[in-house]
Amino acid sequence: MPKLVIDKLDDVRIRTPDDIRPAARVLADIAAAEGMLAAPAHDIADKRTPVDADGNVLAKDIFGWPDREDVWWRNPRIALESPITSACRFETEPFWVNAEGFHLRSPNAYLDAIDISNFEGRARTRAAIVVPVHMAFGKIGAVSFNLLDTKRTDLSAEFERLGDLFGIYSRAFLESYTRVMGSIQALPPGSRLSKREVECLRWAAIGKTDLEISMIMSRSRATVRFHIHNASTKLNAVNRSQTVFKAAQLGYISLH
């Protein structure tokens, strides 16, 4: 196996919003040199895809994907439909995938259980090398690398040669992108959960309903909902489960 040469790491790292387009271009060129298109998603739970400092969609402007209604970056349902997205929730290392299944260096029973029927239609690709990127606050991003030659579906040789390299570059790009662009949605430095909010989330974390929590705490159901909603707002969470998860990530509660 040839020696891994990592000579563009600083070039794919983003330090300011103005670095986004140049860094994206380098990642796109790395993929293009191997006859591939890169498809980055900074948050698989978000229908938005990475943009530059002016809001231009990188998938279209830099990574070379067409601007059609059926393309992956225009389809908000892909997060729910794609088996690739599902796999990224249960795997942290690069893998490759086609209609025959997921191919990893180490077995993962969770991926074996994922439905891959109608793979091409649901994944918007025939085969891809995929890099899951797990980040702070439970956010999961991913970059998939798709061959321009869509007739080929066996990427075993490419994965053996490029899997680790793609992994290093993809993580550097997405982690730095999220750090720079996430400042708009970052938690305010002075934001703190109150004692009541934490108490409600502790009970929610073990599966108690709002009604059950209200009885335990001798508070009204509306009050419990108020505290959990406030915690969700402070943690920039989209639902109850993510609120609990982010509270655990920040050390307010335990999930064990």
Image: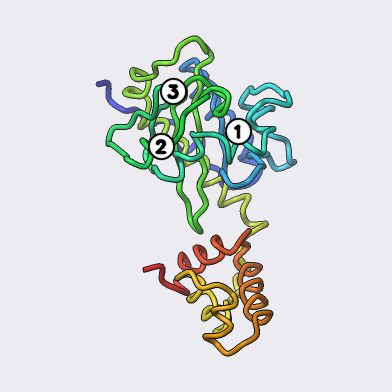
Q: Position of residue 157 (x, y in %)?
A: 33, 17
| Residue beneath disc 3 | 98
Q: CA distance from mark 3 to mark 2?
A: 22 Å
Residue 219 sits in quarter: bottom right
Q: Secondary structure at mark 1?
A: helix
Query: Separation of disc 3 and disc 1 at Cα?
Result: 31 Å
How many residues crowd around disc 3 within 10 Å: few (fewer than 14), some, or many (20 or more)? many
Amino acid type, residue under disc 2 in the picture? Ile
* Horizontal arrangement in the rendering, residue 186 relative to residue 114 (left or right): right
Q: Which mark is residue 168?
A: 2
Above or below, 17 against 70 in this view is: below
- Disc 2 and disc 1: Cα gap in Å? 17 Å
Q: Mark 1 and mark 2 in contact (Cβ < 8 Å)?
A: no
Quadrant in the picture for the N terminus: top left
> Which of 212/242 is in front?
212
Q: Earlier in the sequence, mark 2 or mark 1?
A: 1
Disc ID at residue 22: 1
The quarter of the displayed image where residue 220 is located = bottom right
Disc 3 residue type (three-letter): Asn
In x, y percent, where is residue 70?
Answer: 69, 25
Viewed as shown, does residue 188 lie left or right of 251?
Answer: right
* Camera-side mark, 3 or 2: 3
